[in-house]
Amino acid sequence: MVEAVIQGPGRLAATAQPGRIALLGNPNCGKTALFNLLTGSRQKVANYAGVTVERKEGSLRTASGRRVFVLDLPGAYSLNALSVDEAVTRDVVTGQSSEALPDLLVCVTDATNLRLNLRLVLEAKRLGLPMVVALNMTDMAKKQGIAVDTAVLSRELGVPVIETVGVQSGGAQGLLEALDAPVAAAAPQPWQAPGLDDVLATQREVRRILGMAVREPIGSLATSDRIDRVVMHPVWGMLVLAVTMFLMFQAVFSWANVPMDAIKAGTEGLGNLLKAHMPEGMLQSLLVDGVIAGVGGVIVFLPQILILFLFILALEDSGYLPRAAFLLDRVMGTVGLSGRSFIPLLSSFACAIPGVMATRTISNWRDRITTIMIAPLMTCSARLPVYALLIAAFIPARTVGGVFNLQGVVLFALYVFGIVSAMAVAWVMKRFRDNKQHSPLMMELPAYRWPNVRNLALGLYERAWIFIQRVGTIILTLTILLWFLSTFPSPPEGATGPAIQYSLAGIIGRGLEHIFAPIGFNWQISIALVPGMAAREVAVGALGTVYALSATGDDVAGQLEPLIAGSWSLATALSLLVWYVFAPQCISTLAAVKRETGSWKYVWIMASYLFALAYLACFITYRVAVALGAG
């Protein structure tokens, strides 16, 4: 156990061991990796009260077995906040929020970039809270030839300095031992935004401490710099980015075949098993035609969604995403955005909700609103089941040029279509802005590193669990509701058509068909669009339920692909693909827009313009396809 007392400024008497700590640090300092290492699966994610900034908290066991609660604060470069994230961090550590001050502040720093990190440490020290410095990424610093004298650094800062490696098992052992030491009582000092003289004085102090405690190699070219000569090149860098994105979407189809086939076989076998051992009736129909046809039709796409998330998480963990943002800054500037919008837009490929929430890091309000408005045009993972179904049904599985999967090429084209559409909408919005000046981009470029397997596994587990929860709650509920609407009332005596035609869903579908017939949608598609407003991936399950109940002969929900391939024209399939490029947002995304903007105005603008774009684009696509003989 560490015997040294962790003291706050001006305090000598130790009081008690900390029961609640907060992790404070710059973005990209490895703070979240350290949090994951400390807490493992004992963590939960919520939002701070009153804002949609993500709040991560968990618990750990110290070396003596004592339980300590951990709060992972949003990354901040300074307590002089320039974004909503930084404002939340400032309020928590300065006592301006509704929650109590932490017993101990753990300032996480990047050992390879102390020149930037120490400024926040010195600002935090003036708050009068007990604190320690976690010198993280010490393994990378040693590989780069950077020598940090922790004893000198601790002496000059006046707080304990503990080496950590957030991506290695046992890399936080020293910190865990330190948490068993008693801490001095806090002596909170009032915080004031620093003036220019204070900032300059802090920078001089940082240089003084670095000169005494840190030795860096002279004249050596870091690996990151060598990689950046290619990755950040205006021509080769764009080529690398395009190839990376292209390979990502190729992998979504190529890698997922085996697990998808296994899930399909499992759901089909379960359906046949229930049919063989249950008498015909309402219960069998509910389970086979409702639950299995609906839920099974959605969960089969989990492997593709996880592969997409794997690429995004790996690119983020490697340090590539900030470079892609810088690379695209000039391109995005032509439509009135900065490269800072890139990361929220990339997050929207997974889901538009975190993408909308990530815009809070954009300090310029006009840029932030524009990014929120176009984030839904990024192809979120909820669209993937619809795309995968239609592509598999209408696009042949053959290679192009002897190398590339044609279905993957089409998927990539749909993603590009969404991106180009988003840039076009941003350009139009720029025309209506009073201030058309481009906002300059300033962002830290972290050193490259291999993605950590543990972090990737935790991220994929979290995404998979969220997806399964959606399948088990909202998607299951909507599937059962749709089955009910598709089953009741029963057909009248002498009816010759499928029972669903006489049900409530059939009546609604026939009504909506008049609206969507000009763009090639039949009544089955029209029905599926309604629950798709709650969650887009439900549309696939809805189609499975509708066709299972309207099928004749040997047609079952497990044969949805050949069913639609045989009953829809190519023009209809292309129109539906285009619809989902622009499709009006799910209710959850619209709610996130309301929370982020604080206004219903932007919600109605988003829903209206997306519906108008979707209908217009589908009308053009369908009519052109019919004219070319695809109708």
Image (tube, grey):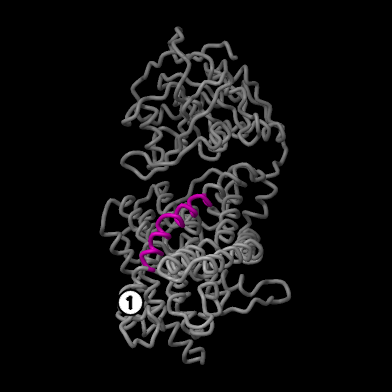
Q: Secondary structure at mark 1?
A: loop
Residue 93 on image: x %, y %:
40, 28
Residue 589 on image: x %, y %:
37, 57
**Three-letter amino acid code at disc 1?**
Ser
Quadrant of the image for the N terminus?
A: top right
| Residue 6, above or below 314 | above
Asked whether residue 421 is in view, the answer is: no
**Camera-side residue: 535 or 110?**
535
At x 44%, y 34%, the residue is 78
Is 442 left or right of 597, judged from the image as shown? right
Q: Which residues are magenta?
A: 463-483
Residue 191 on image: x %, y %:
35, 25
Q: Disc 1 designates what residue?
A: 490
Instruction: Please say whether residue 360 is one of the residues in the magenta stretch.
Output: no
Asked whether residue 518 is in view, the answer is: yes
Residue 370 on image: x %, y %:
38, 59
